[in-house]
Amino acid sequence: MLITDNEFQKLSHFIRQNIGIDLNEKKKNLINSRLGAILENGNFDSFSDYYQYILQDKSGEALDQLIDKITTNHTYFYREKQHYEFLISDVLPYLVQKQKAKKDLRIWSAGCSSGEEPYSIAMVLADFLGNYKAFWDTKILATDISTNVLKKAKEGIYTNENIKNNPQMWNRIYFKPFDDNHSVIVDSIKREVIFRRLNLLSSFNFKKRFHIIFCRNVMIYFDAPTRHKVIRKFYEITEPGGYLFVSHSESLDRGVTSYKYIKPSIYRKEI
Ligand SMILES: C[S@@+](CC[C@H](N)C(=O)[O-])C[C@H]1O[C@@H](n2cnc3c(N)ncnc32)[C@H](O)[C@@H]1O
């Protein structure tokens, strides 16, 4: 069963409004392939039936399932390693000095997928602070809209194939064997990451502002007005002197943000 033009209009509008993901005409095949099995297994006669079911389902499960299918969750450890190198060379020395009295750093991985990004940040912090880590509160908030990926992230179990390109030292000290093919993140790193469900389209009700926000490979799926709204919210919730990291394939449109450009994909709220 293939989605009709009219059904595609309705469903893609719903997805843009509720999840932020912008599906243009070219993505019709993606909808057919990603949602085909749900329609078949749920015995829906058409995409219209399925759409009605999502609208009427009060439990939220139908929407969750749609979100899990429609989001792209590809990620890996130490992705775009220049970002981590810049953390070590510039951002952490500055923030650790700035926060030396309070000894807290507030970091947010927004759109964290299955956890590789926030755990990588936690490992970089553990390396950077060394023995001083015990005196610091550097818990990382990691959020995503998809419940599926958050479940995997909390477990912290990855295939050995997944971690083979990590810095080798990390694999020795921050992972332990789980079974023949998998390794699990050690508790000292797991404890450093707090996973929560959060839709970036909803309002951000945080008590304190963040020193570092990573939102990489997430807003590329949004249309420009949605992206601008989310970036404005990030700006509000960034500490003066704090940083926003997007992915190397993204940039913030000048003129729509007050963040200062530092270098490709790295921005800063001025002090
Ligand atoms: C490609 S992954 C990026 C993971 C990681 N940041 C990285 O760069 O490797 C994109 C993630 O954004 C999440 N996402 C998409 N729309 C979202 C929204 N409206 N609110 C929160 N997360 C969203 C998806 O569920 C997915 O896990």
Image (tube, grey):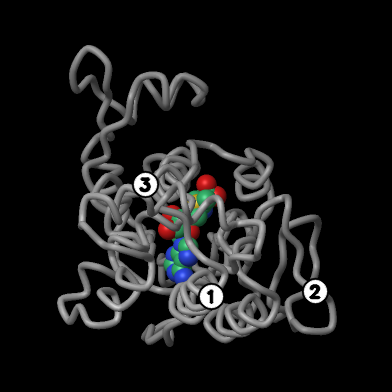
Q: Which mark is residue 6?
A: 1
Which SS class for mark 2?
loop
Q: Quadrant of residue 59?
A: bottom left
The amino acid on which the numbered mark 2 sits, given as a three-letter code, is Asp
Is 85 located above or below residue 248 in the figure? Answer: above
Asked whether disc 2 touches disc 3, contact meaning CB atoms under 8 Å apart, the reply is: no
**Residue 29 visible in the picture:** yes
What residue would you read off at disc 3?
Answer: 114
Which residue occupies the foreground of this view, 83 or 248?
Answer: 248
The residue that appears at 17% across and 82% down in the rendered structure is 58
Which SS class for mark 3?
loop
Is 150 located above or below residue 178 in the figure? Answer: below
Going from the N terminus, do you reach mark 2 or mark 3 first?
Answer: 3
Residue 227, given in percent of the width and then of the height, sits at 64, 75
Foreground label between 2 and 1:
1
The amino acid on which the numbered mark 3 sits, given as a three-letter code, is Ser
Q: CA distance from mark 2 to mark 3?
A: 28 Å
Query: Alpha-carbon neighbours of circle 3 within 10 Å: few (<14), some, or many (≥20)?
Result: many
Mark 2: is the Cβ under 8 angstroms from ligand 1? Answer: no
Q: Quadrant of residue 267?
A: bottom right
Q: Is residue 155 left or right of residue 197?
A: left
Foreground label between 1 and 3:
1
Q: Which mark is residue 253?
A: 2
The amino acid on which the numbered mark 1 sits, given as a three-letter code, is Asn
The residue that appears at 29% across and 81% down in the rendered structure is 55
